[in-house]
Image (cartoon, rainbow, N blue to C red):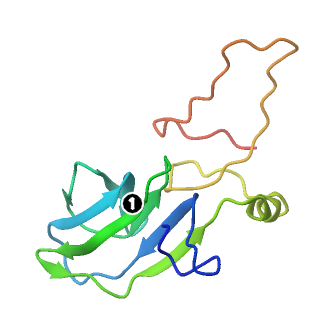
């Protein structure tokens, strides 16, 4: 992420990055990522990669920055030993300007089923003296409509 050609050459220090490419066949995916990545095929999540897992089966890669070290794809991405090229890179630099645009965006009701990475908006009413409050965002339950 820090090596992306954005922010006057300084890269992206935090946020999310989507790496997307087309493939012609299935097979064994090899990619080394720094931190953590979710792998999607045609909008369906097919697995995860982390710094200790290099192999999976097929790509369209989204990488999330969880700490302060260098993040993102580190090196080549291959399927069955064939180098994947021509990635389109979508940078979501989570700066205040991004959140201002997100706040004024047109929101849709949450889908009945999980469709992949998304931003959700809702309201949490924690009462006058909240205690140990948390949100369960597991994907096993569909989100409630707004």
Q: Tell me where residue 94 appears, x and y as whole percent.
A: 66, 59
Judge whether 73 appears above or below 4 on screen: above
Residue behind mark 1: 44
Q: Residues within 10 Å of mark 1 (few under 14, many from 20)?
A: few
Decide which of 49, 127 is in the foreground and name it: 49
Residue at position x 67%, y 19% in the image: 133
Residue at far left of view: 81
Looking at the image, residue 144 sits to the left or right of residue 99; the answer is: left
Across the whole image, how many numbered discs are drawn on residues?
1
Looking at the image, residue 55 sits to the left or right of residue 112; the answer is: left
Looking at the image, residue 52 sits to the left or right of residue 21; the answer is: left
Judge whether 99 appears above or below 145 on screen: below
Residue 132 quadrant: top right
Q: Tell me where residue 89 appears, x and y as whole percent.
A: 49, 77
Decide which of 6, 22 is in the foreground and name it: 6
Residue 73 quadrant: bottom left
Q: Quadrant of the C terminus?
A: top right
Residue at position x 57%, y 71% in the image: 91
Helix, strand or loop at label 1? It is: strand
Residue at position x 38%, y 51% in the image: 35
Decide which of 115, 4 is in the foreground and name it: 4
Looking at the image, residue 94 sits to the left or right of residue 99; the answer is: left
Residue at far right of view: 128
Decide which of 19, 94 is in the foreground and name it: 94
Q: Tell me where residue 74 appears, x and y as whole percent.
A: 32, 67
């Amino acid at each position: 992420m820090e090596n992306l050609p954005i922010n006057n050459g300084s890269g992206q220090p935090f946020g999310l990055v989507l790496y997307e490419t087309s493939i012609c066949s299935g097979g064994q995916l090899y990619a080394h990522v720094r931190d953590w990545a979710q792998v999607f095929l045609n909008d369906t999540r097919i697995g995860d990669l982390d710094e200790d897992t290099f192999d999976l089966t097929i790509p369209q890669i989204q990488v999330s920055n969880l700490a302060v070290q260098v993040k993102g794809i580190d090196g080549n991405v291959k399927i069955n030993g064939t180098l994947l090229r021509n990635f389109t890179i979508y940078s979501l630099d989570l700066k205040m300007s991004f959140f201002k645009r997100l706040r004024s965006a047109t929101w849709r009701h949450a889908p009945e089923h999980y469709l992949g990475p998304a931003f959700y908006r809702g309201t949490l009413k924690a009462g006058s003296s909240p205690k140990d409050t948390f949100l369960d965002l597991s994907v096993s339950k569909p989100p409630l409509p707004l």
